[in-house]
Image (cartoon, rainbow, N blue to C red):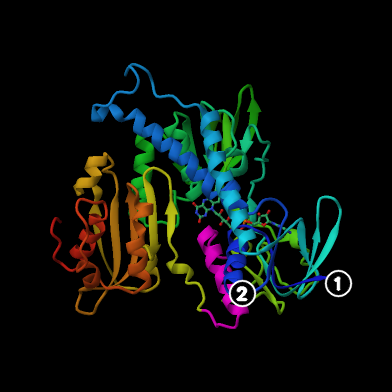
Amino acid sequence: MNEQFDVVVIGGGPGGYAAALYATAADLSVAVVERDRVGGTCLHRGCIPAKELLETASVFRTVAGAGAFGVGVGDGAGKTTIDLATSMRRKQQVVDGLWKGLEGLLKRRQVHLYSGTGTLAGSGRVLVHDDAGEEVELDGAAVILASGSLPRTIPGFEIDESLVLSSDEFLTMQDLPVSAAVIGGGAIGCEFASLLADLGVQVTLLESLPKILPGCDEAVAEVVRRSFTKRGIDVRTGVKVAGHTPGEGGTTIALDGDETVWVERVVVSVGRRPLSESLGLDDTGVEVDERGFVKVDQTCRTTLDGVWAVGDLVATPQLAHVGFAEGITAVKDILGEHPLPVEYDKVPWCIYCHPEVAFVGHSEESARQAGHDVVTSTTHFRGNGRALIVGEADGLVKVVAERRPDGTAGRVLGVHMVGPWVTEQLGQGYLAVNWEATAEDLAALVQPHPTLSESFGEAAMALTGRGLHG
Ligand code: FAD
């Protein structure tokens, strides 16, 4: 007799574990099949280790800049140094602590964890193959596919774990190179370039599009580009890499045209591809598009009745919190609660490079492209007391609002931030966009003083035509 569950989830990353926890909170019986470790990419090879190492870079920056505050380190004579083995150990402790916590939580919530590779054997049937060659069959009234994604590669830059790295190898690096090229100027590429540069590596950032951080508002991307350049990162946009020739202690990257770049190490950061092939979907009725994403409707239903798909496996923003939201949406749909679809154009985005970037909703350009008449307001952190106190005055807050027929600012369409701790400040902007607040609604709110968040309040006030400091 097969084991029976209300919900069987394949994949224990953010999409899968959020679905499992939400389902048990609604008193459904749940099994999760995971072939590696619960927590997925996010916990073991993504968000958490990357942000932990970025924090190391931030501490390094703070220590290196302590002299400006009159604070000496040691005898004040030495250079700031990094012991990468200690940093990596600390990163692993954070990851392992969260991993144990998640395993314990799943157990306490009575989620049945099956170790092995899960494949779909038709509507409501999942086969689990473990490392010992054993096979178990699970019956689920509903099945949620959440197998996630893998790093993309580019031809001519095969990952070899020493010279050419993907994010997986980058996050377990045992030593720092003197120089490195990061291929890809998206969120993860910018985080890696920033991290390496802070730790003293000579970095070349190669991006084929005309600007780095292509999804961001122009003004925000420009602040990051300027800051990177000031910190010695060689930012090259509109360049295509043609291949590389390994040599003594490094490799020569050929760019389109005759240009070359010599570096000790290459980090390929050109996005991630869905991992649908691990699920045995051929002939099951679950359709997959030409890029490998599982096709779903607005509530994450696949083309096979009784089967949902969430997270990086589907063609939506590849973010852990989008995976959480989709896992919850799928479970609500399974419960017959007619959930509202996730509003993908209004999810928060945070990038943890230095300076940090955070945004939600339309950029000025995308709002205009969508046909909105817009009015914008920008406040710079150099006029913010707290920013000067912490010594991080580079950056801005830009609010994009709909222009009313009388010319005044109406509904807030987007909030874009770059600068100190903006990833922790986006909350107000997120609520403003998602609760469809107007500029007047926001201008009436009181911001504590002195805080970085005053810049957001000031930008909103200026939109009403009555800014205090502009
Ligand atoms: P995954 O996390 O990939 O989990 C899928 C799980 O399924 C894995 O554990 C895998 O072992 C398992 N699996 C696969 N196939 C099978 C099978 N057949 N049977 C059983 N198990 C299977 N997102 C953010 O929101 N914020 C960030 O700051 C951020 N930073 C990132 C930094 C880096 C370097 C990277 C690489 C990613 C980052 N992301 C970030 C993206 C985030 O990690 C992903 O969006 C998220 O992990 C996707 O969750 P998921 O559950 O869909 O897939």
Q: Quadrant of the N terminus?
A: bottom right
Kindly check if marks 1 and 2 are in contact, taking CB atoms under 8 A apart as contact: no
Q: Hey, which quadrant is residue 8 in on the image?
A: bottom right
Left or right of 163 on screen, residue 392: left
Residue 332 forms part of the magenta stretch: yes
The stretch of residues the image draws in magenta is 316-339
Magenta region, main secondary structure: helix
Find disc 2 in the rendering and name its residue.
27
Question: Local crowd at mark 1 within 10 Å, few (<14), some, or many (≥20)?
Answer: few
Find disc 1 in the rendering and name its residue.
1
Residue at screen point 22% across, 42% down: 388
Q: CA distance from mark 1 to mark 2?
A: 23 Å
Precedes in sequence: disc 1 or disc 2:
1
**Within the displayed image, which quadrant is ligand 1 positioned in?**
bottom right
Q: Which mark is residue 110?
A: none
Residue at screen point 62% across, 43% down: 168
Q: Position of residue 90 (x, y in %)?
A: 52, 36
